[in-house]
Image (cartoon, rainbow, N blue to C red):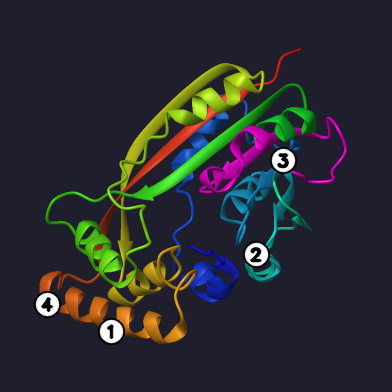
């Protein structure tokens, strides 16, 4: 698929739930997210992960190739009362100076990168004994739940979309970081049930790779109408409690 999240920047900023506070609490146990740390957030999108670090007193730079997403990130930062510097660039070739960050993070985006190249670039950017955090916050399809029904509908409208059935655990990322020279590699995961109104869930799905980021506006409208009907008929509770899983890899650069 030809994916362009910039086409759905407004839905992306309005309806995608950001990482929960519990992620930052757990990262703090690794010494990540401390006030004053210099953090680079790769693939920042609308800035949800970077903004969480900024709220905790970090000095944050957000990097993304999509100018429309970065524009939304700046707007949300202003509403939140935090300041983040933004760079329009790709994670594999940031153009930023060597050893200029204490922490590099990548939220909900590592799978979009040329992963070996991105991992080498992070090694260049992070200070000695600096940390890399790769984090995901994924919906979880289980038989009969709203996620599984939604994924089936996405597949009907976009047969090229092949990302259904995920379980929110990414063991391959451990190989990526080890090959790039990181050590002290640890992972954790936990589940959350995130409230979404029917309207917000429709917006969240429009802001996904399989819908507005890859389909024409006409096809998006047809999908959205069918999702609205599906929710009304099969999942009338409002708001929905949508099953999600947080997964994180935390690792350290050598001395």
Residue 71 belongs to the span the image colors magenta: no
Q: CA distance from mark 2 to mark 3?
A: 16 Å
Q: Is residue 38 above or below residue 63?
A: above
Residue 105 belongs to the span the image colors magenta: yes
For disc 1, the marked residue is 225
Between discs 2 and 3, the one toward the N terminus: 3
Q: Residue at x 45, y 84 (%)?
A: 217
Between discs 1 and 4, the one toward the N terminus: 1
The magenta stretch is 93-118
Contact, mark 3 vs mark 4 (Cβ under 8 Å) = no
For disc 4, the marked residue is 233
Between discs 1 and 2, the one toward the N terminus: 2
Q: CA distance from mark 3 to mark 4?
A: 45 Å
Other residues around mark 4 within 10 Å, as few (<14) / some (14–19) / many (≥20): few
For disc 3, the marked residue is 39
**Mark 3 residue element:** strand
Q: Which mark is residue 73?
A: 2
Closer to the eye: label 3 or 1: 1
Between discs 3 and 4, the one toward the N terminus: 3
Between discs 3 and 1, the one toward the N terminus: 3
- x, y percent for residue 164: 31, 53
Other residues around mark 1 within 10 Å, as few (<14) / some (14–19) / many (≥20): few
Q: Residue at x 24, y 68 (%)?
A: 153
- x, y percent for residue 41: 67, 46
């Amino acid at each position: 698929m030809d994916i362009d999240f910039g086409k759905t920047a407004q839905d992306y900023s309005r309806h995608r739930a950001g990482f929960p506070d519990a992620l930052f609490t757990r990262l703090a146990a690794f010494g990540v997210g401390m006030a004053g740390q210099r953090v680079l957030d790769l693939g920042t999108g609308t800035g949800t992960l970077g903004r969480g670090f900024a709220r905790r007193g970090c000095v944050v730079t957000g990097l993304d190739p999509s100018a429309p997403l970065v524009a939304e990130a700046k707007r949300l930062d202003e509403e939140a009362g935090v300041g983040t510097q933004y760079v329009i660039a790709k994670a594999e070739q940031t153009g930023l100076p060597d050893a200029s960050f204490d922490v590099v993070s990548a939220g909900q985006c590592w799978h979009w990168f040329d992963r070996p190249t991105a991992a080498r670039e992070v090694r260049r950017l992070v200070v000695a004994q600096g940390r890399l955090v790769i984090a995901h916050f994924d919906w979880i399809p289980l038989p009969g739940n709203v996620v599984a029904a939604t994924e089936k509908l996405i597949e009907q409208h976009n047969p090229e979309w092949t990302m259904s059935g995920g379980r929110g655990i990414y063991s391959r990322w451990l190989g990526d970081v080890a090959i790039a020279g990181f050590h002290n590699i640890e992972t954790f995961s936990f589940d959350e049930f995130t409230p979404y109104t029917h309207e917000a869930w429709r917006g969240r799905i429009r802001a996904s790779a399989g819908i507005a980021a890859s389909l024409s506006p006409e096809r998006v409208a047809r999908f959205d109408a069918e999702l609205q009907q599906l929710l009304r008929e099969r999942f009338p509770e409002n708001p929905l409690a949508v099953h999600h899983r947080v997964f994180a890899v935390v690792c350290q650069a050598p001395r």
